[in-house]
Amino acid sequence: MLKKLLFITLFLILITSINNSVVLAQKTTEDPLIIVCLAADKINANFDHALRLHSKGGFFIGEPVEIWRTINGTLQCAVDKNGEPLCSDPKAVTVGKEFKVYSNARETKNGKVGIISSDGGITISEVRSWTAEEMAHVFYGVQRIDTTPISAESLAQKLAQAQIRGGSETNCVTINWDPYGIVFDAISYEPIPAVNVELLDSQHKKVPVNPGVKANPFLTSLDGKFNFLVPDGIYYLLPSKQNYFFPLNSTQIAALSGQTVYTDLYVGDPIVQKGKIEHRDIPMNPADVNKPTDNPPQIMSINITSFTQGGTFYQLVYGLTTHPQTIIKAYSDERALGQTSADRTGKFELAINSSLIGPEKPIRLIPEKGSFYALAKNRVGPEVRIDPLPSFLEGYAYDKSLKAVADANVHIVLTGMDNKIAASVKADENGFVRISNLLIPPLPFKIVITDNQGNLINQMTPRNFISLNKKYLDSNQVDLFSDLSYNNTTASYSAVVANPNSIVFAENRVGGLPDSKTDKTASEQTSEKENQGNSLALVFITLIILLMLSGLGMYLFRLRSQHINSPQSIDSNLH
């Protein structure tokens, strides 16, 4: 009996030790994503940041649609009126009431959550979206495609029927709420940075920091803007900066009446907020009127999305500048692509015909002060660059030694969505891949190439991919920025697979792919360390088990020897 008990105990120790010490690889699969930019309309001007979101098409009927927004290039998931996330990804970033759907009910179907599309489009009658850090809001509907048991050919036909690109609406791009105010120089009309704007209550006491008042005082940036989101009541603002004066007298205020950029000028009177958000711009006078504020304009944030209209594929570049009414000029090398003017809040957007852009060239954006800043000397700001988005992808999947990788897995990875994989396809035996525009997202992404075990082979931007495939693209006259070149079911698509399908990722890679900053990525180095640690642990456990077996053998041998040599045993043998 004792012998059996010892063997059972040893067996349990062995199993428990292995399970606790060895990190087992996990299989992870995700569905390809349909991503459609949603149109957004303000409901009541600036009241409580309320919007109506909608799309004419682009989704499969009867399936859930997740609701996302981009803030400074990062995607965030909405919550419903009960605070439940309107997305399936447990790692999705939510910000509570700052991005909340009030009208539509959250539904679950086949493990996916979102708002059900009844007619291929979607309409959300009330959503509220607010943030103090960024005013340009862009909204997307995200729908997950079930790849099983559908074939690659059937999936291509299904995607074509959804008319993904055709479902986008041209007014989908940006909604921005007027800032609660801009502090500006009353002489040069330029925004003043580094001003402390203090919010006071009706008793002239400082309002404490809370979810709507993230800082008090609020320190203005290069754009001179400040933001406070407060309940109804009576408030005061107190701006301060060395060598600037506030408030202006009546004569100085009268001198500003000719300009139309700054409105609701604040001179220290009480602000009564009731039922709507109050806006105030604050003029300040420099101590030396001969040396007013004069800073070069800068592009503070920049983003890009793509859409098709009238058979033309466009890049829509949008962002914020430091100065209202800044002129934004766009170039591809030295070729002019167009220009636009920022509005009175500094928001700009420019639609660029993709056929005008050099395929291996970034879009160059140069900010320049307009005629509004008549006294300015620093008129031109630093250049900013952004890569255009291709309509589709075609070429070879190369490794870091520039060899085409046969049967490689090619993933479209959303860089602003925690490296979420939007789509995955399989390269052929020559390493060739062709990805329909229906699977290319209308927002920035990178291309990640792995083998069947999930090992990282290479990763690159779309512009890098185009450069590596320049010879093939030129000789075959393939323009990756043309409209819907492969939007038909007869094209020879690469096989669409789950994201990823039957690929084993180590635990540190689940949910995304590592960034490539060195020859060995941080994730690969971490994985190597984990594997080394696991190997050492396994060796250590094996030694313990051998020692335990040796000890058990010695114990049983001694037990048997004692039994044989005991007087009782001798006596029984004599009889």
Image (tube, helix red, strand yellow):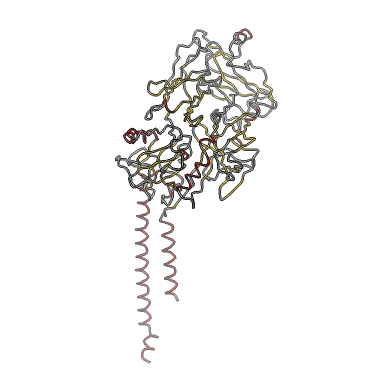
In this view of the protein, can residue 431 be seen by the observer?
yes
In this view, the residue farthest toward the front is: 490
**Quarter of the figure with residue 285:** top right
Q: Position of residue 485 (x, y in %)?
A: 43, 35
Residue 222 higher or lower than 448, as above or below: above
Q: Is residue 133 left or right of residue 458?
A: right
Q: Nearer the viewer, residue 50 or 36?
A: 36
Q: Position of residue 408 (x, y in %)?
A: 36, 46
In this view of the protein, can residue 202 be seen by the observer?
no
Specify the quadrant that holds the N terminus. bottom left
Specify the quadrant that holds the C terminus. bottom left
Q: Nearer the viewer, residue 556 or 370?
A: 370
Q: Nearer the viewer, residue 461 or 234?
A: 461
Q: Nearer the viewer, residue 162 or 390?
A: 162
Q: Is residue 454 left or right of residue 264?
A: left
Label count reads 0
Q: Position of residue 266 (x, y in %)?
A: 63, 17
Q: Position of residue 321 (x, y in %)?
A: 50, 22
Residue 234 higher or lower than 70, as above or below: above
